Image: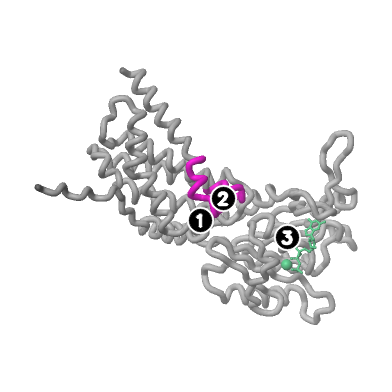
């Protein structure tokens, strides 16, 4: 009696290396965005960083005190130089004090060099001091674009129109800032900030989402050098459409690559050829949402997701929906599968990024984000029927 050979277990071995490689490549491509924030103690510098970049560095306090008055905080995509404003009673003139801080920054590695400066002043200070003006001039002289950020603006809601406005004093301050004159001589003076943005990160009861932050990120992006704009888009957390704009071309490229890989139709059993393409795409998208593979899931769990996406089970169940597709993976199916995967993954990353998904439950919630691909398949099926 001959013994039947034991069937090989239906397991796809998916290598997560393409994900790791693509992550490293994307990180080095985008680099780090460095911002300097200057302002007196308590003006709200840390609160701004938390609101715009979603990093709670103020609380964890893992800043590196570089020298007195200068701290550097960083992760992969963002570096913050936290620089104290002019100390009242200091013997050193303001411009000189700042120059010493800027020298400290210049002496640091290339990856830590500043792109844009937020010079922060409390809105209800009602004026810029001579020290502020000297410091802003020093920054400009060093070629750094300065945004003058008025912090802790009290926004008052007009009970009739429902519109938000600011107190008269702040309005006057802004008028002066738009056309500054010397208080003694009344002659116009030049203070080289590029723009004035009114902000708050909370209302006076410590609540609310803040104001002016969208304007602040738009202005910061505009002032960033072209080769650092993507780094800023990635580092910030307020504007999701910017991230989608970065993710969509990546999905398109992977879709083309997947269609190419299946240009000669392959049996579904070999559908794993798509895994490296899809894992690379997923890694690049995760980078745009500033998500670490480590915080998302273990490498093993990720490989499993990859297997589910590109693997036999998924591909064959999809193929059932396509009339007459049979048991092969062709260019159209591979492309559609990859496009849908990319779109679903982008949405999942977006949800995690905005804190709407529990990281622990990522593998479970994935299926909630895939319906998109069923739509694509249905559309393909409909087109096919229409042509027939
Ligand atoms: N009302 C109001 N309070 C704010 C706002 N932003 C920050 N605060 C409060 O102001 C205090 C100081 O804010 P921080 O963000 O720590 O200020 P900082 O400039 O980083 O201060 P230092 O690190 O000490 O130099 C905190 O108690 C904040 O809660 C705001 O927009 N409105
Ligand atoms: Mg602080």
Asked if the residue under mark 2 is in contact with the one under mark 1, i.e. CB atoms within 8 Å, the reply is yes
* Label 3 CB-ligand 1 distance < 8 A: yes
Range shown magenta:
349-368
- Kindly identify which residue carries mark 3: 47
Upstream in sequence: badge 3 or badge 1: 3
Disc 2/disc 3 C-alpha distance (Å) = 22 Å
Q: Is residue 308 left or right of residue 154?
A: left
Residue sitting at 61 percent across and 47 percent down? 356
Q: In this rendering, is residue 22 above or below 81? A: above
Question: What percent of the width, then of the height, locates residue 14?
Answer: 33, 53
Q: Is residue 347 left or right of residue 170?
A: left
Where on the picture, by quarter, is residue 269?
top left
Upstream in sequence: badge 1 or badge 2: 1
Residue sitting at 71 percent across and 75 percent down? 69
Q: In this rendering, is residue 369 above or below 322? A: below
Question: What percent of the width, then of the height, locates residue 217?
Answer: 65, 51
Q: Nearer the viewer, mark 3 or mark 1?
A: 1
Q: How many numbered marks appear?
A: 3
Question: What percent of the width, then of the height, locates residue 31?
Answer: 50, 61
- Kindly identify which residue carries mark 1: 296
Numbered disc 2: secondary structure:
helix
Give the quadrant of the C terminus.
Answer: top left
> Would residue 222 be visible to someone looking at this image?
no
- Kindly identify which residue carries mark 2: 352
Where on the picture, by quarter, is residue 84?
bottom right
**361 within the magenta span:** yes
């Amino acid at each position: 009696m001959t013994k039947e050979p034991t069937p090989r277990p239906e397991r796809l071995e998916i290598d997560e290396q393409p994900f790791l490689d693509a992550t490293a490549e994307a990180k080095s491509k985008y680099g780090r965005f460095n911002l300097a924030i200057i302002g007196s103690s308590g003006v709200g510098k840390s609160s701004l960083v938390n609101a715009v970049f979603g990093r709670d560095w103020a609380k964890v306090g893992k800043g590196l005190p570089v020298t007195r008055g200068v701290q550097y905080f960083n992760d992969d995509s963002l570096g913050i130089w936290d620089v104290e404003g002019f100390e009242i009673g200091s013997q050193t003139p303001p411009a000189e004090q700042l120059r010493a801080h800027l020298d400290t920054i210049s002496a640091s590695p290339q990856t830590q060099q500043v792109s844009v400066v937020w010079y922060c002043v409390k809105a209800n200070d009602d004026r810029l001091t001579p020290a502020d003006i000297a410091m802003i001039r020093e920054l400009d002289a060093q070629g750094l674009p300065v945004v003058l950020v008025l912090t802790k603006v009290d926004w008052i809601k007009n009970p009739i129109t429902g519109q938000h406005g600011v107190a008269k004093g702040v309005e006057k301050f802004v008028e002066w800032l738009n056309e500054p004159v010397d208080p003694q001589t009344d002659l116009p003076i030049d203070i080289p900030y590029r723009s004035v943005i009114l902000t708050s990160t909370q209302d006076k009861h410590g609540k609310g989402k803040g104001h002016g932050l969208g304007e602040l990120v738009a202005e910061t992006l505009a002032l960033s050098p072209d080769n650092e704009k993507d780094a800023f888009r990635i580092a910030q957390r307020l504007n999701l459409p910017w991230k989608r704009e970065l993710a969509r071309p990546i999905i398109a490229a992977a879709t083309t690559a997947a269609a190419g890989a299946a240009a000669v139709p392959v049996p579904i059993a070999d559908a794993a050829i798509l895994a490296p393409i899809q894992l690379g795409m997923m890694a690049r998208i995760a980078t745009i949402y500033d998500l670490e593979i480590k915080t998302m899931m273990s490498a093993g769990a990720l490989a499993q997701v990859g297997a589910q996406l590109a693997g036999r089970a998924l591909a064959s169940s999809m193929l059932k929906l396509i009339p007459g597709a049979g048991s092969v993976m062709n260019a159209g199916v591979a492309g559609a599968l990859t496009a849908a995967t990319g779109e679903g993954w982008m949405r999942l990353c977006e949800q995690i990024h905005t804190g709407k998904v529990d990281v622990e439950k990522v593998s479970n919630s994935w299926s909630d984000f895939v319906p998109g691909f069923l739509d694509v398949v249905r559309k393909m099926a409909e087109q096919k029927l229409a042509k027939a």
